[in-house]
Amino acid sequence: MSEEKNLGSILVVGGGISGLTTAIEAAEVGYDVYLVEKNPYLGGRVAQLNKYFPKLCPPACGLEINFQRIRKNPKVKYLTMAEVESISGQPGDYDVTVKVKARKVNENCTACNACIEACPVDRLNDFNFGMDSTKAVYLPHQMAFPMRYVIDEKACKGSSCAKCVEACKYDAIDLEMEADTVNFKVGSVVWATGWQPYEASQIDTLGYGKVPNVVTNMMMERLAAGNGPTGGQIQRPSDGKVPETIAFVQCAGSRDENHLAYCSYVCCMASLKQATYILEQNPEAKVYIYYIDLRTPGRYEKFLKTIEANENVVMIKGKVANITADPESGDPVVVAEDILGGGLVRQKVDMVVLATGMQPSTAEKKAPLDFKYDEHGLILEDPQAVGVYATGCAKNPVDVTSGVKDATGAALKAIQTMVRR
Ligand SMILES: Cc1cc2nc3c(=O)[nH]c(=O)nc-3n(C[C@H](O)[C@H](O)[C@H](O)COP(=O)(O)OP(=O)(O)OC[C@H]3O[C@@H](n4cnc5c(N)ncnc54)[C@H](O)[C@@H]3O)c2cc1C
Ligand code: SF4
Ligand code: SF4
């Protein structure tokens, strides 16, 4: 029988598609990996998408393949609701301290749902961007990995209530569970903390939070998703009407010196994909896409050509000046310059989708490491780096295919540090 060698451990921070890829690739060649994720589930933003461009397949399939690889591989130790507090040491020998929040639901949970029926408290569902609610005890989403419930500490009434504890036949709920600190050693670190949607209310002119039925592209992903707030039926939030006219506003915050100066890379493809969500449900709907330039790099050009060929999709080249509410109906009114057609366009629609960009999570919270950042908080690639590396949207806005390639490269870099120790 061959004896398994101890090749050493790698820390991967962020359990989105980039971090999952680095962790699994490194573990499958024999390294132990600690995967630290702040959400109660793995999968990151991809878990919130309805379909993947360009194939339009459900992201849950790709994620499930990765979760299977983790289930089968004891070398990946993942911690959810966890954040790194400190990292000290040198390449090949780092001491790591991780703080793990109290989930208040233990491994006994069978996802039977009885606690939800008993819990009297509602909270806004952040997974669906506040478009619906869950109970204080909840499953983060239908395909969550791990498939284990969690209690929102801020919403829960605690031991004075404890109705969920009574309802649980499996002794899975522990309202007294406390946060924990975990310490371990690793030889290299990969930072994969990804992105967050740019806060649309910061773009004064585009009406988000002021004009009814102006939503973001990530909200549209949830509205179209079968496990979303409307069961996959795209409806406008104010009155549930099925929209017949929809405007997409590209570069909402991106390529703008006052917000994100860079191109967020995926939002043109995301809007073209979302046009298919709308037309699939209502082939008579009219979709207007306002753009500065449409960016569909490489083979994505074919996807653009297919969508453009639909006569119900109208492309208008021009920057949107503002979005206001029609005084009579309250419907959004988009005002833009039509560069190719000439003149100002003023268009009343049922719903507007802002193609908001991707901002790195490190804009808000930096890594406890010696990374250099650009003015937006994106981690700068350092070709000389040894021991600590960044990957995925923490470094650059990317689609899943490019993210997975970069994350595989990051696994190799992390392994090289271990080999050269
Ligand atoms: C509207 C929209 C639609 C899209 N559709 C597609 C598509 O169809 N096809 C496609 O290829 N791409 C699509 N994308 C892009 C896709 O979402 C990204 O490529 C992907 O999310 C990148 O993965 P990531 O792991 O780098 O980042 P993320 O998905 O953001 O994962 C990062 C993970 O790190 C965790 N984290 C953050 N901070 C910490 C911390 N301090 N400690 C621990 N964990 C932390 C987060 O909770 C998260 O789980 C779309 C993007 C948008 C905006
Ligand atoms: S915590 Fe208990 S009641 Fe709630 S889903 Fe899990 S096993 Fe069921
Ligand atoms: S103790 Fe908290 S989670 Fe449990 S039922 Fe009461 S409010 Fe809900």
Image (cartoon, rainbow, N blue to C red):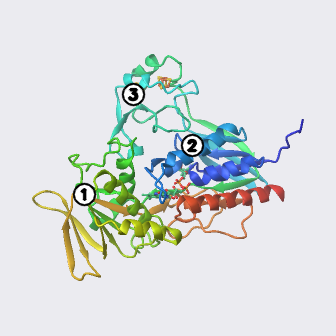
Look at the image and tell me whether residue 259 can be seen. Answer: yes
Q: Position of residue 226 (x, y in %)?
A: 39, 42
Asked whether the residues under the numbered discs 3 and 1 touch, taking CB atoms below 8 Å apart as contact, a structural biologist would say: no
- Percent coordinates x, y for residue 89 in the rendering: 75, 54
Of the numbered discs 3 and 1, the one sitting upstream in the chain is: 3
Q: Earlier in the sequence, mark 2 or mark 1?
A: 2
* Furthest residue in direction left, as rendered: 328
**Which is in the foreground here, disc 2 or disc 1?**
1
Residue that numbered label 1 is attached to = 284
Q: Are marks 2 and 3 in contact (CB under 8 Å)?
A: no
Name the amino acid, label 3.
Lys
Report helix, strand or loop for mark 3: loop
How far, Cα to Cα, is label 3 from label 1? 48 Å
Q: How far apart, in angstroms, are the residues tagged by discs 2 and 1? A: 35 Å
Q: Give the mark nearest the N terminus, 2 or 3.
A: 2
Q: In this picture, is 177 found above or below 411?
A: above
Q: Is residue 251 among what the camera can see? A: no
- Tell me which corner region of the image, top left, top right, bottom left or bottom right, holds residue 160: top left
Horizontal relation, residue 260 to residue 232: left or right? right
Give the residue pinned by disc 3: 157
Is residue 60 or residue 355 the one in the foreground?
A: 60
Instruction: Provide the residue designation for mark 2.
Output: 64
394 vs 6, left or right, is left
Q: Position of residue 288 (x, y in %)?
A: 28, 66
Q: Is residue 48 found left or right of 327 in the rendered image?
A: right
Assess mark 3: CB under 8 A from ligand 3? Answer: yes
Q: Quadrant of the N terminus?
A: top right
Q: Residue at coordinates 24% horizontally, 54% vertically from top-left?
A: 243
